[in-house]
Amino acid sequence: MKQGAERKAWLDYVRFFSIFLVIVFHTPPRLPLFDDAVILNLRVPVFFCISGFLYNINKFSGFGHYLRHRSKQILVPYTTFFIVFYALWLLVGRRMVGTEEQAISVCRPLFEFVFGDPQVVLAPFWYIACLFTMQMLYYWIERLVPRRWVFAVCVLIALLVYVAPWGWKFDAFGHTYRVMGFWNLGNAMLFLPFYALGNNCKGWLERLQFSGVSRSALLVALAVASMTLMVAVAPVEEYNPTLYRLIRIVAGMMVIPAYMCCAKWLARRYGQRRVIEFVVVSGTVYLGLQNYLIGIGRLLLEKFTHPGIMDEQVWLKFVLALAVMVAIYPVAWLIDRYIPWFLGKSRSHWKK
């Protein structure tokens, strides 16, 4: 296998399992230790790290070119998905959820869409808004800061989220918003070190693998320590969420190397898989549809069994998550084949 193909394969495995973990995290019931110590520690940090790994400033002639490219890839699906699900929310969503949802102003989702924090409609798309803001920030950091200092500057910017008096809030349409929530600026700054890690350490991440007993033991020990740390500090979230999020960053940095080495081992063993690659390139579709299909799947499961079965049979959490991944696949294929513009894409090689 060629080196380029092998690298692409392990990247696909990293993102594929991260997508699965995102769906598992959103699938009930909530398992505090597992969700917080394992899934929460992997899903967001790994995604941002891989996004940074794939970033290449040399592909763009200037900021205008870069802005157009990222707008097409990020803002187009952000807009099209919102339009569809906002219409569905107006037509049936409010009545299905009940009186609490009916009390929400019809203008609130529109405001959240413009604000970059879609909580009522398409809540998982906070990630897209955050990624867009992060990429804009990183473009200028890399342009203005010497390469050897980029990672350190990104860490300092992340720390500003904690020390700067940016907790200003305001009310709009019956809900309270943080000023730093505008286009998820606060989260973009918070997770910026992961993006910088992926971009600044490309060579190291490509070479990193389970080779030798001592190195493998060290990477596994770091991963175990990371999960142990997340379990130990779980109570901190209730009375000091700021400290808790800071510890999450440290724990995420500790577990990423072992996670990527596992993906490389799978890539060497099983090679490239067309299904895995397609799920990865359709990640936005999975992100947008997951919560709705999880809700439908849970309703059907409880209708044909009994309410509360998922709380009794915890293993159903993983079965439902896998079923959701399978159910989204044909929808993603149809979008890719017939309306790729919905995702800001042109006709892809999948149709050839």
Image (spheres, rainbow, N blue to C red):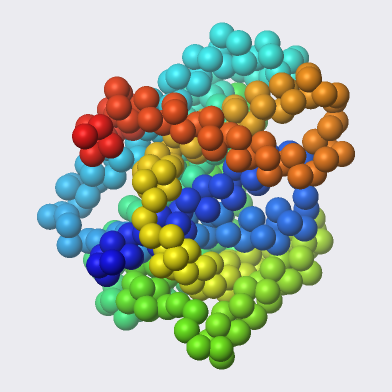
Pick whichever, 225 or 76, lies toward us. 225
Q: Residue at x 39, y 51 (%)?
A: 273
Give the left or right position of residue 332, taking residue 126 as reference.
left
Judge whether 348 appears above or below 307 on screen.
below
Q: Residue at x 74, y 26 (%)?
A: 301
Judge whether 139 appears above or below 118 on screen.
below
Residue 315 locus on image (x, y percent): 76, 44
Q: Residue at x 78, y 20 (%)?
A: 304
Q: Which of the image's four quarters has the C terminus?
A: top left
Judge whether 23 appears above or below 2 on screen.
above
Q: Which of the image's four quarters has the N terminus?
A: bottom left
Residue 61 seen in this snapshot: yes
Residue 86 locus on image (x, y percent): 50, 19
Give the left or right position of residue 222, taking residue 122 as reference.
right
Q: Residue at x 25, y 67 (%)?
A: 2
Residue 231 locus on image (x, y percent): 76, 65
Residue 347 locus on image (x, y percent): 22, 32
Give the left or right position of residue 277, taking residue 61 as reference.
right
Residue 195 seen in this snapshot: no
Give the left or right position of residue 76, taking residue 301 as reference.
left
